[in-house]
Image (tube, coloured by chain):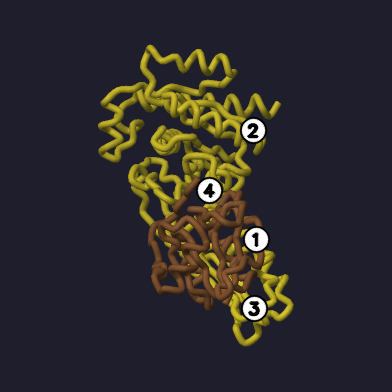
Amino acid sequence: MIAVFCTKADGINLDDRFGRCDHFTIVDVDSGKTIKTIGNSAKNSSDSAGLKAAQIILDIDADILIAPLLGPKAHGAILPFPIEIYNQGISKTISEILKNYKLGKLSLMTNPKVEGLHKV
Amino acid sequence: MRIAIVSGKGGAGKTTVTVNLSAVCNNISVIDCDVEEPNCHIFLKPHISEIVDVFTEYPEIDKSLCINCGACSSFCKFNAFLSSKNLTISMKELCHSCGGCIRVCKENAIKYSKRSIGSISSGKSEGLDNKNDFHYGVLNIGEMSGVKIVEQLKKKCFDNNLLLIDSPPGTACLAVSAVEGSDFAVIVLEPSLFGISDMEMVIEMLNDLKIPFGVVINKIDSENEIYNYCIKNKLIILGEIPFISKIAEINAKGELLTSVSVKYKELFQKIYQNILKQVSRLAK
């Protein structure tokens, strides 16, 4: 099972943005090992960073996405695809989240309904 | 001749200038391109003889033909497609109807459908003696772009007539599409810091589009430093509208300044004459 996290460039610490996060870190959930860290090419787009990032997530072919709050467009766009989106919540690291995921403590993200999060 | 009435800031007085100018010219057409919030019709009180829908096109994917190759999603600059190896979806509200996806889809799985994004109302302005041709567009609530409506509005008018274009405020796509192709632009300037800084962006836009312009200063009182600003920046002042409550009252009633007082009629006649003077000077 493959999970994608929104992280800083170090691939360890979590970013608090989805569309404009530094890197996407791809992790094998069962072993807890990082498979790959890729730069987020959507990071500096003038608009629709969330949707561009959504295509990156689809290209990774992940099973689950663990992310900070997604905007309604990105959330709605990913919804038809077989990817589960979980809230990363207040956790700061991947290992912390993986522990919570295995304990069934992560919550599924519902559509935020707030247009344009526009986090800088 | 096409004259666009523009401003950087909303509420500067574009509509006031447009409708009152239209009242002092003959053989003129007026189009209200501020499709997100049109209001010329409040003053011109048109008898609407025709309302037509404006359509936009958006892609629909035939799932039986789609092989999820991702050509459409990697082509589309507006992210109107998302694709994975098992599923491709289109998001119609993000589409700009460029037609590129249809060309890059080798499986012919994409077809355009139509939906109405708004309408154009046409008629004669009953509020005026000269009964000018008048058209205004309305964009449906929730639609992203009214550019298609503006483009069709501009086709409504004949080249031999004088055309007044009430533009949307600012310098976004909608304003650019309204102004594009005009022979002259009238910037309505409100003498505030906000008004000036927003106008500077409009000047940049007009210079890019190579459209000559002049300025009408609205809401002016005697102590304004706006004159110095205009002189310093070599802006042509076409006219001034004083900052008095009487004008606001007339406007709030939805009446034309020109039909209330001869003084205002002369004021707009003078603005019109100054515009003509500038246009003929440029023609030489």
State which tag comes first along the sequence, 3 or 4: 3
State which tag comes first along the sequence, 2 or 4: 4
| Secondary structure beneath label 1 | strand
Count neighbours of disc 3 (C-alpha within 10 A) and say few if under 14, some if 14 to 19, many if 20 or more.
few
Q: Amino acid at mark 3?
A: Lys
**Chain shown in brown:** A
Indicate the chain on which mark 4 is placed: B
The image shows residue B156 at horizontal and vertical percentages of 54, 54
Q: Do callouts 4 and 1 mark residues in contact (Cβ within 8 Å)?
A: no
**Do the dots labelled 1 and 3 sit on one chain?**
no
**Do the dots labelled 3 and 4 sit on one chain?**
yes
Q: Give me the disc on residue A62.
A: none
Vertical position of residue B155 compared to residue A77: above or below: above
Residue position marked by numbered label 1 in the rendering:
A37
| Secondary structure beneath label 2 | helix
Residue at 68 percent of width and 29 percent of height: B283
Residue position marked by numbered label 3 in the rendering:
B85
Horizontal arrangement in the rendering, residue B89 relative to residue B136 (left or right)? right
**Which callout, 3 or 4, points to the residue nearer the camera?**
3
Residue at 69 percent of width and 76 percent of height: B69
Q: Amino acid at mark 4?
A: Leu
Most foreground residue, B79 or B184: B79
Residue at 47 percent of width and 66 percent of height: A75
Count neighbours of disc 1 (C-alpha within 10 A) and say few if under 14, some if 14 to 19, many if 20 or more.
many
The image shows residue A15 at horizontal and vertical percentages of 52, 53
**Number of marks drawn:** 4
Tell me how far mark 3 sits from mark 4, CA to CA. 37 Å
| Secondary structure beneath label 3 | loop
The image shows residue B225 at horizontal and vertical percentages of 44, 14
**Chain shown in yellow:** B
Residue position marked by numbered label 2 in the rendering:
B207
